[in-house]
Protein backbone atom coordinates (compact mmCIF):
# COMPACT_ATOMS: atom_id res chain seq x y z
CA UNK A 1 0.00 0.00 0.00
CA UNK A 2 1.25 3.47 -0.82
CA UNK A 3 0.00 5.00 2.41
CA UNK A 4 1.11 2.90 5.42
CA UNK A 5 0.85 5.60 8.08
CA UNK A 6 -1.73 4.87 10.75
CA UNK A 7 -3.80 7.72 12.16
CA UNK A 8 -3.15 9.26 15.51
CA UNK A 9 -5.52 8.49 18.37
CA UNK A 10 -8.93 9.90 17.59
CA UNK A 11 -11.85 10.50 19.91
CA UNK A 12 -14.24 9.24 17.24
CA UNK A 13 -15.15 5.60 18.01
CA UNK A 14 -14.53 3.15 15.18
CA UNK A 15 -15.42 -0.44 14.44
CA UNK A 16 -12.26 -2.45 13.71
CA UNK A 17 -12.05 -3.70 10.15
CA UNK A 18 -10.09 -6.89 10.68
CA UNK A 19 -10.76 -9.00 7.59
CA UNK A 20 -12.52 -8.74 4.21
CA UNK A 21 -16.24 -9.45 4.31
CA UNK A 22 -15.90 -12.37 1.86
CA UNK A 23 -12.59 -13.55 3.31
CA UNK A 24 -9.13 -13.09 1.85
CA UNK A 25 -9.26 -13.88 -1.88
CA UNK A 26 -6.71 -16.27 -3.39
CA UNK A 27 -3.65 -14.87 -5.13
CA UNK A 28 -4.09 -15.14 -8.91
CA UNK A 29 -0.97 -15.57 -11.02
CA UNK A 30 -1.81 -17.42 -14.25
CA UNK A 31 -3.38 -16.54 -17.59
CA UNK A 32 -6.51 -18.58 -16.95
CA UNK A 33 -7.02 -17.00 -13.54
CA UNK A 34 -6.56 -13.52 -14.97
CA UNK A 35 -9.15 -14.21 -17.67
CA UNK A 36 -11.66 -15.49 -15.11
CA UNK A 37 -11.09 -12.43 -12.92
CA UNK A 38 -11.62 -10.15 -15.92
CA UNK A 39 -14.97 -11.81 -16.64
CA UNK A 40 -16.12 -11.32 -13.07
CA UNK A 41 -14.97 -7.69 -13.06
CA UNK A 42 -16.80 -7.03 -16.32
CA UNK A 43 -20.00 -8.29 -14.70
CA UNK A 44 -19.62 -5.86 -11.80
CA UNK A 45 -20.88 -2.30 -11.62
CA UNK A 46 -19.53 1.12 -10.77
CA UNK A 47 -16.00 2.29 -10.04
CA UNK A 48 -13.08 -0.08 -9.56
CA UNK A 49 -10.94 0.20 -6.43
CA UNK A 50 -7.23 -0.43 -7.02
CA UNK A 51 -4.06 -0.53 -4.99
CA UNK A 52 -0.57 -1.88 -5.49
CA UNK A 53 2.17 -3.21 -3.27
CA UNK A 54 5.78 -2.59 -4.20
CA UNK A 55 9.05 -3.46 -2.49
CA UNK A 56 10.60 -0.04 -1.95
CA UNK A 57 13.59 -0.35 0.32
CA UNK A 58 14.21 -3.89 -0.89
CA UNK A 59 14.22 -3.69 -4.69
CA UNK A 60 15.70 -1.23 -7.16
CA UNK A 61 12.64 -1.20 -9.37
CA UNK A 62 9.30 0.30 -8.42
CA UNK A 63 7.34 -2.50 -10.06
CA UNK A 64 4.08 -3.76 -8.61
CA UNK A 65 4.47 -7.11 -6.89
CA UNK A 66 0.77 -7.33 -6.01
CA UNK A 67 -2.30 -5.60 -7.42
CA UNK A 68 -5.50 -5.40 -5.38
CA UNK A 69 -8.79 -4.88 -7.23
CA UNK A 70 -12.37 -4.65 -5.98
CA UNK A 71 -15.65 -3.85 -7.72
CA UNK A 72 -19.25 -3.93 -6.55
CA UNK A 73 -20.86 -7.16 -7.68
CA UNK A 74 -17.49 -8.74 -8.49
CA UNK A 75 -15.68 -8.97 -5.18
CA UNK A 76 -11.97 -8.55 -4.49
CA UNK A 77 -8.99 -9.91 -6.37
CA UNK A 78 -5.30 -10.22 -5.51
CA UNK A 79 -3.24 -10.25 -8.69
CA UNK A 80 0.38 -11.43 -8.78
CA UNK A 81 1.76 -9.89 -12.02
CA UNK A 82 5.27 -11.28 -11.72
CA UNK A 83 5.16 -14.75 -13.29
CA UNK A 84 3.00 -14.01 -16.35
CA UNK A 85 2.89 -10.24 -16.93
CA UNK A 86 2.12 -10.80 -20.62
CA UNK A 87 -1.11 -12.58 -19.66
CA UNK A 88 -2.63 -9.50 -18.00
CA UNK A 89 -4.35 -8.33 -21.21
CA UNK A 90 -7.90 -9.39 -20.20
CA UNK A 91 -7.58 -7.42 -16.96
CA UNK A 92 -6.05 -4.46 -18.76
CA UNK A 93 -8.98 -4.37 -21.17
CA UNK A 94 -11.71 -4.62 -18.55
CA UNK A 95 -10.13 -1.89 -16.43
CA UNK A 96 -9.88 0.50 -19.39
CA UNK A 97 -13.02 2.60 -19.09
CA UNK A 98 -14.49 2.40 -15.60
CA UNK A 99 -13.45 4.99 -13.04
CA UNK A 100 -10.45 3.94 -10.96
CA UNK A 101 -10.48 4.70 -7.25
CA UNK A 102 -6.96 5.05 -5.86
CA UNK A 103 -5.47 6.52 -2.73
CA UNK A 104 -2.42 8.68 -3.58
CA UNK A 105 -2.68 7.89 -7.29
CA UNK A 106 0.73 9.36 -8.08
CA UNK A 107 2.31 6.43 -6.26
CA UNK A 108 0.33 3.66 -7.93
CA UNK A 109 -0.24 4.90 -11.48
CA UNK A 110 3.40 4.57 -12.66
CA UNK A 111 3.76 0.88 -11.80
CA UNK A 112 0.29 0.09 -13.20
CA UNK A 113 1.16 1.88 -16.43
CA UNK A 114 4.43 -0.03 -16.64
CA UNK A 115 2.34 -3.20 -16.82
CA UNK A 116 0.16 -1.76 -19.58
CA UNK A 117 -2.89 -0.72 -17.54
CA UNK A 118 -4.69 2.39 -18.79
CA UNK A 119 -6.90 4.70 -16.75
CA UNK A 120 -9.42 6.96 -18.44
CA UNK A 121 -11.16 8.23 -15.30
CA UNK A 122 -9.93 8.64 -11.73
CA UNK A 123 -11.00 9.41 -8.19
CA UNK A 124 -8.05 9.95 -5.82
CA UNK A 125 -9.22 9.75 -2.20
CA UNK A 126 -6.05 11.33 -0.82
CA UNK A 127 -6.30 14.30 -3.17
CA UNK A 128 -10.01 14.61 -2.36
CA UNK A 129 -9.06 14.80 1.30
CA UNK A 130 -6.66 17.63 0.59
CA UNK A 131 -9.30 19.56 -1.34
CA UNK A 132 -11.62 19.13 1.64
CA UNK A 133 -8.97 20.63 3.90
CA UNK A 134 -8.59 17.53 6.08
CA UNK A 135 -5.73 17.60 8.57
CA UNK A 136 -4.86 13.93 8.02
CA UNK A 137 -5.27 12.36 4.60
CA UNK A 138 -3.79 8.89 5.12
CA UNK A 139 -6.21 6.12 4.21
CA UNK A 140 -6.79 4.84 7.73
CA UNK A 141 -7.62 8.30 9.06
CA UNK A 142 -10.18 8.95 6.33
CA UNK A 143 -11.78 5.53 6.59
CA UNK A 144 -12.24 6.25 10.28
CA UNK A 145 -13.65 9.75 9.70
CA UNK A 146 -16.02 8.98 6.84
CA UNK A 147 -16.98 5.35 7.48
CA UNK A 148 -16.37 4.89 11.19
CA UNK A 149 -14.12 1.90 10.57
CA UNK A 150 -10.73 1.18 12.05
CA UNK A 151 -8.40 0.06 9.26
CA UNK A 152 -5.45 -1.84 10.63
CA UNK A 153 -2.06 -1.00 9.14
CA UNK A 154 1.35 -2.52 9.44
CA UNK A 155 2.76 -4.15 6.27
CA UNK A 156 2.96 -1.30 3.77
CA UNK A 157 6.75 -1.13 3.95
CA UNK A 158 7.26 -4.90 3.75
CA UNK A 159 9.19 -6.78 1.06
CA UNK A 160 6.32 -7.58 -1.29
CA UNK A 161 8.70 -9.34 -3.69
CA UNK A 162 8.77 -12.20 -1.18
CA UNK A 163 7.11 -15.44 -2.27
CA UNK A 164 4.92 -16.91 -0.95
CA UNK A 165 3.33 -13.88 0.66
CA UNK A 166 2.32 -14.46 4.29
CA UNK A 167 -1.44 -14.76 4.98
CA UNK A 168 -1.47 -11.73 7.27
CA UNK A 169 0.07 -9.61 4.50
CA UNK A 170 -2.60 -10.74 2.05
CA UNK A 171 -5.30 -9.88 4.58
CA UNK A 172 -3.78 -6.41 4.94
CA UNK A 173 -3.59 -5.99 1.16
CA UNK A 174 -7.21 -7.02 0.58
CA UNK A 175 -8.42 -4.64 3.29
CA UNK A 176 -6.85 -1.70 1.49
CA UNK A 177 -9.49 -1.94 -1.25
CA UNK A 178 -12.29 -3.41 0.88
CA UNK A 179 -14.08 -0.11 1.50
CA UNK A 180 -12.31 2.16 -0.96
CA UNK A 181 -15.40 2.59 -3.17
CA UNK A 182 -17.55 3.36 -0.13
CA UNK A 183 -14.97 5.93 0.94
CA UNK A 184 -15.02 7.41 -2.56
CA UNK A 185 -18.80 7.82 -2.41
CA UNK A 186 -18.72 9.46 1.02
CA UNK A 187 -15.97 11.85 -0.04
CA UNK A 188 -17.71 12.69 -3.28
CA UNK A 189 -20.78 13.68 -1.26
CA UNK A 190 -18.60 15.81 1.02
CA UNK A 191 -17.05 17.50 -2.00
CA UNK A 192 -20.56 18.26 -3.25
CA UNK A 193 -21.56 19.76 0.08
CA UNK A 194 -18.42 21.93 0.00
CA UNK A 195 -19.06 22.91 -3.64
CA UNK A 196 -15.71 21.42 -4.61
CA UNK A 197 -16.72 18.59 -6.92
CA UNK A 198 -15.67 20.47 -10.04
CA UNK A 199 -12.33 21.22 -8.39
CA UNK A 200 -11.84 17.52 -7.81
CA UNK A 201 -12.79 16.58 -11.37
CA UNK A 202 -10.20 19.01 -12.73
CA UNK A 203 -7.53 17.78 -10.32
CA UNK A 204 -8.14 14.12 -11.09
CA UNK A 205 -8.01 14.84 -14.82
CA UNK A 206 -4.76 16.74 -14.31
CA UNK A 207 -3.19 13.82 -12.40
CA UNK A 208 -4.08 11.43 -15.22
CA UNK A 209 -2.61 13.67 -17.91
CA UNK A 210 0.46 14.92 -16.10
CA UNK A 211 3.70 13.94 -17.90
CA UNK A 212 6.36 11.94 -16.10
CA UNK A 213 8.87 14.18 -14.35
CA UNK A 214 12.37 14.07 -15.86
CA UNK A 215 14.98 12.29 -13.73
CA UNK A 216 16.95 14.43 -11.32
CA UNK A 217 20.43 15.46 -12.39
CA UNK A 218 23.44 14.67 -10.21
CA UNK A 219 21.45 12.23 -8.08
CA UNK A 220 24.65 11.18 -6.34
CA UNK A 221 24.63 14.54 -4.56
CA UNK A 222 21.66 13.29 -2.54
CA UNK A 223 23.90 10.84 -0.70
CA UNK A 224 23.21 11.27 3.01
CA UNK A 225 25.75 13.49 4.83
CA UNK A 226 27.54 14.45 1.63
CA UNK A 227 27.90 17.92 3.16
CA UNK A 228 30.69 16.50 5.35
CA UNK A 229 32.89 15.97 2.28
CA UNK A 230 34.75 19.22 1.75
CA UNK A 231 37.02 18.52 -1.24
CA UNK A 232 36.26 18.10 -4.93
CA UNK A 233 38.33 14.89 -4.95
CA UNK A 234 36.24 13.53 -2.10
CA UNK A 235 33.05 14.42 -3.99
CA UNK A 236 34.40 12.59 -7.03
CA UNK A 237 34.88 9.53 -4.83
CA UNK A 238 31.29 9.77 -3.66
CA UNK A 239 30.14 10.06 -7.26
CA UNK A 240 32.15 7.04 -8.46
CA UNK A 241 31.12 4.83 -5.54
CA UNK A 242 27.50 5.90 -6.00
CA UNK A 243 27.65 5.05 -9.72
CA UNK A 244 29.22 1.64 -9.03
CA UNK A 245 26.55 0.90 -6.44
CA UNK A 246 23.81 2.05 -8.82
CA UNK A 247 25.01 -0.33 -11.54
CA UNK A 248 25.01 -3.29 -9.15
CA UNK A 249 21.65 -2.37 -7.64
CA UNK A 250 19.97 -2.02 -11.02
CA UNK A 251 21.47 -5.24 -12.36
CA UNK A 252 20.44 -7.24 -9.30
CA UNK A 253 17.17 -5.36 -8.71
CA UNK A 254 18.18 -4.62 -5.13
CA UNK A 255 17.66 -1.34 -3.31
CA UNK A 256 20.93 0.65 -3.47
CA UNK A 257 21.14 1.02 0.31
CA UNK A 258 21.17 -2.75 0.62
CA UNK A 259 24.12 -3.00 -1.75
CA UNK A 260 26.17 -0.40 0.12
CA UNK A 261 24.81 2.12 2.64
CA UNK A 262 25.33 5.84 2.13
CA UNK A 263 27.30 5.97 5.38
CA UNK A 264 29.93 3.63 3.93
CA UNK A 265 30.29 5.77 0.79
CA UNK A 266 30.88 8.87 2.90
CA UNK A 267 33.33 7.02 5.16
CA UNK A 268 35.39 5.86 2.17
CA UNK A 269 35.36 9.32 0.57
CA UNK A 270 36.62 10.89 3.80
CA UNK A 271 39.26 8.23 4.50
CA UNK A 272 40.63 8.03 0.92
CA UNK A 273 42.02 4.47 1.33
CA UNK A 274 45.11 3.67 -0.71
CA UNK A 275 44.45 -0.04 -1.21
CA UNK A 276 41.79 -2.70 -0.86
CA UNK A 277 43.42 -3.67 2.41
CA UNK A 278 42.97 -0.14 3.73
CA UNK A 279 39.38 -0.12 2.47
CA UNK A 280 38.39 -3.32 4.27
CA UNK A 281 39.58 -1.85 7.56
CA UNK A 282 36.81 0.73 7.36
CA UNK A 283 33.37 0.17 8.94
CA UNK A 284 30.98 -1.84 6.74
CA UNK A 285 33.68 -2.63 4.16
CA UNK A 286 35.20 -5.19 6.54
CA UNK A 287 32.09 -7.36 6.55
CA UNK A 288 32.07 -10.64 4.61
CA UNK A 289 29.72 -9.42 1.87
CA UNK A 290 31.59 -6.17 1.27
CA UNK A 291 35.01 -7.84 1.34
CA UNK A 292 33.88 -9.83 -1.72
CA UNK A 293 33.09 -6.53 -3.45
CA UNK A 294 36.27 -4.77 -2.31
CA UNK A 295 37.80 -4.78 -5.79
CA UNK A 296 34.70 -3.12 -7.25
CA UNK A 297 34.66 -0.36 -4.63
CA UNK A 298 38.42 0.15 -4.83
CA UNK A 299 38.22 0.50 -8.61
CA UNK A 300 35.67 3.28 -8.15
CA UNK A 301 37.92 5.03 -5.65
CA UNK A 302 40.88 4.77 -8.02
CA UNK A 303 38.83 6.21 -10.88
CA UNK A 304 38.14 9.26 -8.75
CA UNK A 305 41.79 9.51 -7.78
CA UNK A 306 42.92 9.44 -11.43
CA UNK A 307 40.68 12.30 -12.57
CA UNK A 308 42.35 15.54 -13.56
CA UNK A 309 41.43 18.67 -11.66
CA UNK A 310 39.27 19.79 -14.57
CA UNK A 311 37.33 16.52 -14.44
CA UNK A 312 36.43 16.86 -10.78
CA UNK A 313 32.85 17.82 -9.92
CA UNK A 314 32.24 21.33 -8.62
CA UNK A 315 31.98 21.51 -4.86
CA UNK A 316 28.59 23.13 -5.15
CA UNK A 317 25.85 21.58 -7.23
CA UNK A 318 25.11 23.47 -10.44
CA UNK A 319 22.04 25.63 -9.90
CA UNK A 320 18.97 24.94 -11.97
CA UNK A 321 15.76 26.89 -11.98
CA UNK A 322 15.16 29.95 -9.88
CA UNK A 323 17.38 30.94 -6.96
CA UNK A 324 15.95 30.70 -3.44
CA UNK A 325 13.55 33.55 -2.71
CA UNK A 326 15.79 34.69 0.13
CA UNK A 327 18.37 35.69 -2.53
CA UNK A 328 16.03 37.54 -4.86
CA UNK A 329 16.35 41.02 -3.39
CA UNK A 330 19.77 41.94 -4.83
CA UNK A 331 19.21 40.15 -8.13
CA UNK A 332 15.59 40.97 -8.88
CA UNK A 333 14.11 43.36 -6.32
CA UNK A 334 10.84 43.69 -8.21
CA UNK A 335 10.38 39.90 -8.06
CA UNK A 336 11.20 39.92 -4.36
CA UNK A 337 8.51 42.54 -3.78
CA UNK A 338 6.00 40.49 -5.76
CA UNK A 339 6.84 37.36 -3.78
CA UNK A 340 6.50 39.21 -0.47
CA UNK A 341 2.99 40.22 -1.51
CA UNK A 342 1.70 37.24 -3.47
CA UNK A 343 2.81 34.36 -1.27
CA UNK A 344 0.95 35.55 1.86
CA UNK A 345 -2.04 36.32 -0.35
CA UNK A 346 -2.13 32.72 -1.61
CA UNK A 347 -2.06 31.44 1.97
CA UNK A 348 -4.90 33.78 2.86
CA UNK A 349 -7.06 32.64 -0.07
CA UNK A 350 -6.26 28.99 0.68
CA UNK A 351 -7.28 29.37 4.31
CA UNK A 352 -10.53 31.07 3.32
CA UNK A 353 -11.43 28.11 1.09
CA UNK A 354 -10.07 25.43 3.44
CA UNK A 355 -7.56 23.98 1.03
CA UNK A 356 -3.76 23.66 1.43
CA UNK A 357 -1.88 26.52 -0.23
CA UNK A 358 0.17 24.06 -2.28
CA UNK A 359 -3.04 22.62 -3.72
CA UNK A 360 -4.47 26.05 -4.45
CA UNK A 361 -1.45 26.91 -6.61
CA UNK A 362 1.77 25.03 -7.15
CA UNK A 363 4.57 26.73 -5.17
CA UNK A 364 6.83 26.44 -8.24
CA UNK A 365 4.23 28.23 -10.36
CA UNK A 366 3.86 31.00 -7.75
CA UNK A 367 7.63 31.51 -7.66
CA UNK A 368 7.87 31.61 -11.45
CA UNK A 369 5.03 34.12 -11.71
CA UNK A 370 6.63 36.35 -9.10
CA UNK A 371 10.02 36.12 -10.79
CA UNK A 372 8.74 36.82 -14.31
CA UNK A 373 6.03 39.31 -13.43
CA UNK A 374 3.22 40.18 -15.81
CA UNK A 375 3.47 42.55 -18.74
CA UNK A 376 1.56 45.81 -18.40
CA UNK A 377 -1.27 46.41 -18.21
CA UNK A 378 -1.53 44.07 -15.22
CA UNK A 379 -5.02 42.66 -15.42
CA UNK A 380 -6.81 39.60 -14.10
CA UNK A 381 -6.90 38.30 -17.68
CA UNK A 382 -3.13 38.66 -18.02
CA UNK A 383 -2.49 36.85 -14.74
CA UNK A 384 -5.01 34.17 -15.70
CA UNK A 385 -3.14 33.58 -18.96
CA UNK A 386 0.19 33.31 -17.14
CA UNK A 387 -1.26 30.84 -14.63
CA UNK A 388 -2.87 28.79 -17.40
CA UNK A 389 0.44 28.62 -19.25
CA UNK A 390 1.95 27.23 -16.05
CA UNK A 391 -0.63 24.47 -15.78
CA UNK A 392 -3.04 25.99 -13.26
CA UNK A 393 -6.52 24.57 -13.48
CA UNK A 394 -9.66 26.62 -14.08
CA UNK A 395 -10.84 26.56 -10.46
CA UNK A 396 -7.42 27.66 -9.22
CA UNK A 397 -7.29 30.58 -11.62
CA UNK A 398 -10.84 31.62 -10.76
CA UNK A 399 -9.87 31.99 -7.11
CA UNK A 400 -6.46 33.60 -7.56
CA UNK A 401 -6.04 35.51 -10.84
CA UNK A 402 -7.94 38.66 -9.90
CA UNK A 403 -6.51 38.99 -6.35
CA UNK A 404 -2.96 38.42 -7.63
CA UNK A 405 -3.44 41.01 -10.37
CA UNK A 406 -4.72 43.56 -7.88
CA UNK A 407 -1.85 42.88 -5.49
CA UNK A 408 0.84 43.14 -8.16
CA UNK A 409 -0.70 46.21 -9.76
CA UNK A 410 -0.68 47.94 -6.38
CA UNK A 411 3.08 47.56 -5.92
CA UNK A 412 5.23 50.65 -6.46
CA UNK A 413 7.04 50.94 -9.76
Image (cartoon, rainbow, N blue to C red):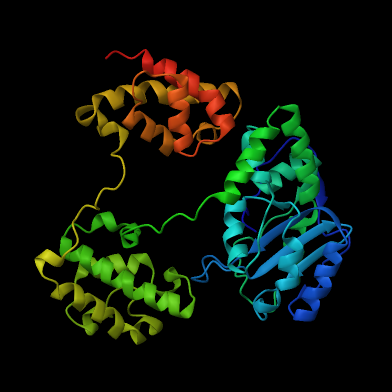
Q: Nearer the viewer, residue 13 or 298?
A: 298
Q: In the image, is 73 to the left or to the right of 212?
A: right
Q: Tell me which corner region of the image, top left, top right, bottom left or bottom right, holds residue 321.
A: top left
Residue that appears at 84% across and 63% down: 42
Identify the residue at horizontal 27%, vertical 66% (top origin): 238
Image quarter (top left, top right, bottom left or bottom right) of the N terminus: bottom right
| Residue 335 position (above or below residue 140) | above
The residue under the point 29% across, 79% down is 297
Residue 279: percent from the left, percent from the top?
A: 25, 78
Q: Is residue 390 left or right of residue 224?
A: right
* The C terminus: image quadrant: top left
Give the answer, above or below, for where 161 lies relative to 1. below
Residue 130: x %, y % from top left:
62, 37
- Does 33 appear above or below 55? below
In this orientation, which residue lies closer to the viewer: 230 or 104? 104
Q: Name above or below for residue 192 compared with residue 35.
A: above
Q: Quadrant of residue 366?
A: top left
Q: Visible in this render: residue 357?
A: yes
**In-front residue for pair 121/291:** 121
Measured from the top left, where is residue 200 in percent x and y? 66, 38
Q: Is residue 80 left or right of residue 45?
A: left
Residue 136 appears in the figure: no
Residue 48 falls in image quadrant: bottom right
Q: Indicate the position of residue 45 as horizontal and vertical percent values.
A: 86, 54
Q: How many marks?
A: 0
Amino acid sequence: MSDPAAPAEDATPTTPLLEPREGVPPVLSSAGQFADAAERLAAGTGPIALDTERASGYRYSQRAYLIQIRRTGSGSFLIDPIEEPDALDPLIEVLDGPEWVLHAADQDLPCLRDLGFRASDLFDTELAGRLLGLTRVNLAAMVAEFLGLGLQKGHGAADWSRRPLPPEWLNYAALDVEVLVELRDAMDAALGDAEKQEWAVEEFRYVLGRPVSPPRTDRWRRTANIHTIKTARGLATVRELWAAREEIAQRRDVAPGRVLPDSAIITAAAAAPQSAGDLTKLPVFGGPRQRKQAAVWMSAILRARDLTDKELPPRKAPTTGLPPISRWEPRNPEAAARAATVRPLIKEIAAAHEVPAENLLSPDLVRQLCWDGVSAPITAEAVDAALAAGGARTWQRALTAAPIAAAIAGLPG
